[in-house]
Amino acid sequence: MDVYGIIGNPVEHSLSPPMHEAAFRERGIDAKYVTFEADPDRIEEAFRGAEALGIDGLTVTLPFKHDAFEFAEPDEQIRRVGAVNTIDFTESGPVGYNTDMTGTLRAFEHHDVALEGARTVVVGAGGAARALAFGFEDAGADVQIANRTASKAHDLADEVPGATGHELEDLPDLMADADVVANATSVGLESDESVAPADAWHGDLVAFDAVYKPLETRFLKDAAAAGAQTIDGAWMLLFQGVDAFETWTGEDAPVETMNEALRSHL
Ligand code: ATR
């Protein structure tokens, strides 16, 4: 039997176990997907232990994505993001991926939203914003970053080729000329607030929210009310899992099954 798992702290409410177990069942793969709540002071030991135990793959969540980046050998693209959320324990050693980034791009593809040449606005400058900004840039989009602490938006923009940094106050102006607006802040998480003013939305925008609790955030509700297309945060969660599954097993992921398993637990 193969063993996979998610490592984080806290991790008990993770939706990854039902999603991956449904995928393994559907594909007839004899595998278990376990939750590991690791001690932050012993995270490197935990990664080495997982490798020594012969664990096949790990999903890495907060607060260990940077530790995973240092532990697992990431490729060039991921080296820029500075975070790893998926480890594949291969015969030649642990390999790190960032399927938050690649999965988000697949979520856009799934919704027939082309990012190449699109004018995108990423709101936020934390870990989620980094994955989105590098992902959008990689997909050929024009990237603008707006953040409450403007200096952090400028710092991130300096790292992403061609990107520009802005204050949050500029968001309505940026939205007026944009094709895609992505919320990568924690605003809206278990609250009815939005980081974007309701009257800044218009029907030519695509709204993406990395927050998935609730699924229908104020950000997405305001966007939909103005006629914008919306992509909720569960799509990012789904496709990061889809990409991880395909990396680990080499098989096509059962996307519909994983989506149903995920949404039935939300
Ligand atoms: P993550 O790694 O999940 O992205 P994070 O690094 O804590 O989380 O980043 C949270 C983001 O949400 C930041 O961009 C933060 O803005 P600051 O850099 O100014 O702190 C943003 N954020 C959190 N609360 C906010 C609020 N009330 N209004 C606007 N932005 C907020």
Image (cartoon, rainbow, N blue to C red):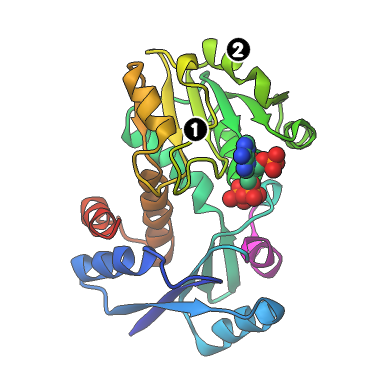
Which residue is tagged 1?
Answer: 194
> From the viewer's perspective, is residue 39 above or below residue 234?
below
In magenta, the rendered stretch is: 64-78
Residue 133: give x, y in percent of width and height: 61, 35
- Residue 35 in percent (x, y) is at 44, 77
- Residue 8 locus on image (x, y percent): 54, 70
Confirm whether residue 212 shows in the render.
yes
Dot 1: element: loop
**Amino acid, disc 1:** Ser
Can you say whether 177 is above or below 102 in the image? above
Residue 24 figure quarter = bottom left
Is residue 201 found inside the magenta-colored segment of the image?
no
Question: Residue 171 placed where, x, y %?
Answer: 61, 20
Please tell me in which quarter of the rendered image ligand 1 is found. top right
> Of helix, strand and loop, which one carries label 2?
helix
Label 1 packing within 10 angstroms: few (<14), some (14-19), many (20+): some
Return the residue at label 2.
173
168 is higher (above) or lower (below) than 110: above
Picture quadrant where residue 168 is located: top right
Q: CA distance from mark 2 to mark 1?
A: 16 Å
Depth-wise, is mark 2 or mark 1 nearer the camera? 1
The residue that appears at 62% across and 64% down in the rendered structure is 63
Q: Is mark 2 within 8 Å of ligand 1?
A: no
Q: Quadrant of residue 91?
A: bottom right
- Is disc 2 surrounded by few (<14), some (14 to 19) or many (20+) residues within 10 Å? few
Q: Is residue 219 left or right of residue 263?
A: right
Q: Is residue 45 left or right of residue 172?
A: right
Residue 141 appears in the figure: no
